Image (cartoon, rainbow, N blue to C red):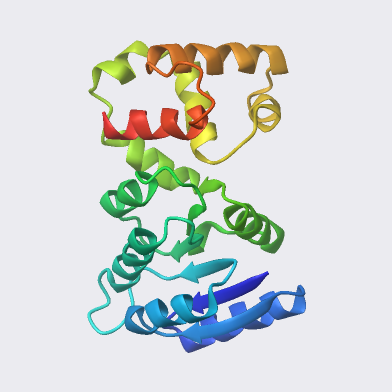
């Protein structure tokens, strides 16, 4: 893959570049702030960009704002947010465009290089990949809604794993359920969230968005 890396820490940036290069990927640009990220992505049109959230000059939300600008310009721009911090409002806004190709991983919780590279590949392929802790905090903002009240504990578990981009087979393995049971839970989720079958929309993505935005 062709990748842009946006990370203000020189050591971490160099480490990411070396890791990606050793795994056969091409880092087409490496930048240290959000201002440089925008033109780098516009020029190189990478398969995916790895973006830190807090970068110079204020170390607050420069990376996120740059990411949102790029998605507003082109929803097909794949972005993997890679940060120590959870910014739920921005994560919800990035998910709200429904285009996929978005990831949000926490640096301190990535324990395996292969998991990180797999998430990067999935985001580049148009999937949505979220760290479970990000999902937990996003869901926490909606715990008192009528939609949440209508879901069983198992249905919430299934929806949380769907938000991480997991397939039905992966959900079944994680929850120790049969594939048929997961399919029934997913169907009930679609019904409760008011999502009829459609050839134009991805109901799995819409289910997560409907739950987060309620």
Q: Is residue 151 left or right of residue 11?
A: left
State whether residue 21 appears in this view: yes
Quadrant of the snapshot with the C terminus: top left
Residue 36: quarter of image: bottom left
Residue at position x 71%, y 59% in the image: 114
Counting the numbered discs, the total is 0
Q: Is residue 12 above or below residue 154?
A: below
Residue at position x 28%, y 27% in the image: 143
Q: Is residue 163 above or below residue 102?
A: above
Residue extending farthest to the front is 200
Of 146 and 35, the residue lying toward us: 35
State whether residue 178 appears in this view: no
Q: Is residue 193 above or below residue 51?
A: above
Q: Is residue 170 left or right of residue 191?
A: right
Of 10 and 186, the residue lying toward us: 186
Of 19 and 200, the residue lying toward us: 200
Of 86 and 3, the residue lying toward us: 3
Residue 144: quarter of image: top left
Q: Is residue 147 above or below residue 49?
A: above
Percent of width and height locating residue 5: 52, 77
Percent of width and height locating residue 79: 48, 62
Percent of width and height locating residue 119: 61, 55
Percent of width and height locating residue 166: 61, 37
Quadrant of the snapshot with the N terminus: bottom right
């Amino acid at each position: 893959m062709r990748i842009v890396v946006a990370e203000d820490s020189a050591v971490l940036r160099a480490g990411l570049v070396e890791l990606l290069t050793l795994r056969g990927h091409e880092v087409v640009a490496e930048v240290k702030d959000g201002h440089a990220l925008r033109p780098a992505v516009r020029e190189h049109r990478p398969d995916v960009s790895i973006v830190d959230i807090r970068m110079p000059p204020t170390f607050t939300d420069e990376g996120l704002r740059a990411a949102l600008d790029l998605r507003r310009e082109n929803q097909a721009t794949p972005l993997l947010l890679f940060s120590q911090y959870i910014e739920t409002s921005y994560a919800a806004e990035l998910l709200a465009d429904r285009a996929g190709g978005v990831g949000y991983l926490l640096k301190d919780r990535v324990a395996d290089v292969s998991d990180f590279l797999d998430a990067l590949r999935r985001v580049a392929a148009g999937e949505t990949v979220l760290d479970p802790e990000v999902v937990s905090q996003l869901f926490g903002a909606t715990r008192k809604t009528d939609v949440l009240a209508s879901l069983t504990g198992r249905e919430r578990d299934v929806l949380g794993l769907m938000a991480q981009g997991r397939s039905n087979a992966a959900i079944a393995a994680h929850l120790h359920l049969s594939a048929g049971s997961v399919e029934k839970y997913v169907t009930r989720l679609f019904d409760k969230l008011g999502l009829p079958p459609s050839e134009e929309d991805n109901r799995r993505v819409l289910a997560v968005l409907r739950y987060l935005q309620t």
